[in-house]
Image (spheres, rainbow, N blue to C red):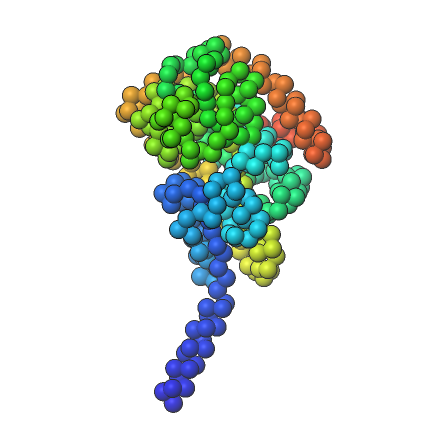
Amino acid sequence: MHRRLIALAAIAAATGAQAQTVLTASSWLPPTHTLSMAQKEWCDLLEKNTAGKMKCNILPRGVSPAPGTLDAVKNGLADISYTVHGYTPGRFVLTQMAELPFLGDKAEPLSVAFHRVASKHPEFDAEHQRAGVKPLAYFTHGPGIVFNTKRPIVKPEDLQGLKFRVGGGMVNEISKTLGMNVTLKPAPDSYELLSTGVMDGTLFPAESTDSFKIDKIIKHATVFPGGLYNTSFVFMINPARYDKLTADEKKAVDAVSGEVAARIFGKGWDRVDAIALDNMKKNGVAIVAAPPGLVSEVKIRVNKLERDWAAAAEAKGLQNAAAVLSDFRAEAAKLQK
């Protein structure tokens, strides 16, 4: 009888284990980075909402360096992760909408606005489906700042003669329009590039000065109202893995994705941006607000980029791209209040 009870208990345990659905989660950033923590928060919420029937296996290391993450999810090396659209040049055009200047001073409302507007237009999802992934949420980081080790940037001419690291996407085009000498490199390379003098500066949100340990290397920061640029991200899942989920499991994933996930990622970024700005002040970084003349010059030069983006987006199938951009700006402005 005793052996029979043990056998029944073993069968019950095995059945319970089989009933639990586990998603493999990968992050190319350290576990303490806000994006890794936001992904874990999403996983914890999924597990809580499903009473433990679904959970994540968060890998101790990323399955790929940052630029290869999208393909890693596409190929099933991880079920879920996030990536910067600009890390895979040429694949994404529509999402560059969220990378234009002066969109907002907070990541959370901008991320929600980005996801809301992108969700109205199936062309955004289709662009990702062609790349081999299923979007769970679109989001952005906080407003982009110009950092450097040499001098204050208060007019366009101050940018000349300096070498900057950028992450790709629209920020690359903005930088070129301003006549900057830029090199496309992933964010984790920043410490080595700046500490060795290979690069003189980088374009980052405030948070990244702490995350990539350049807070004591950079000397100058120029902030722009609404950010000089932004960076668009996607939180994504392998489509085949999603398709294998039951109808209830898909509902559970969907319930914590979309605006919920966008808010999780954006809110986390705002929190660490505020901490980093305080640390910059403590470390003696000279922070200047971009003077009106510099802001005006940037606005004049990026007008063409907006028109170019609209034309490229329409060529990719997005109808009335200029109106979509206007809708996004209006939604972002409304949520920033």
> Can residue 110 be spotted in the picture?
no
Q: Where is residue 135, by image quadrant? A: top right
Question: Count the marks: how many?
Answer: 0
Q: Is residue 276 above or below residue 28?
A: above
Q: Is residue 62 above or below residue 177?
A: below
Q: Is residue 301 above or below residue 325?
A: above
Farthest residue toward the left? 282
The image position of residue 318, as x and y in percent, is 69, 34
| Foreground of the two, 16 or 50 | 16
The image position of residue 9, as x and y in percent, is 41, 78
The image position of residue 180, as x and y in percent, is 50, 18
Instruction: Name the side, left or right, on which 289 lies relative to 318.
Output: left
Q: Where is residue 272, by image quadrant? A: top left
Residue at 42% across, 77% down: 10
| Foreground of the two, 49 or 240 | 240
* The N terminus - image quarter: bottom left
Residue at 48% across, 59% down: 22
The image position of residue 126, as x and y in percent, is 66, 42
Farthest residue toward the bottom? 1
Residue at 53% across, 12% down: 297
> Can residue 303 be spotted in the picture?
yes
Residue at 41% across, 24% down: 198
| Foreground of the two, 196 or 210 | 196
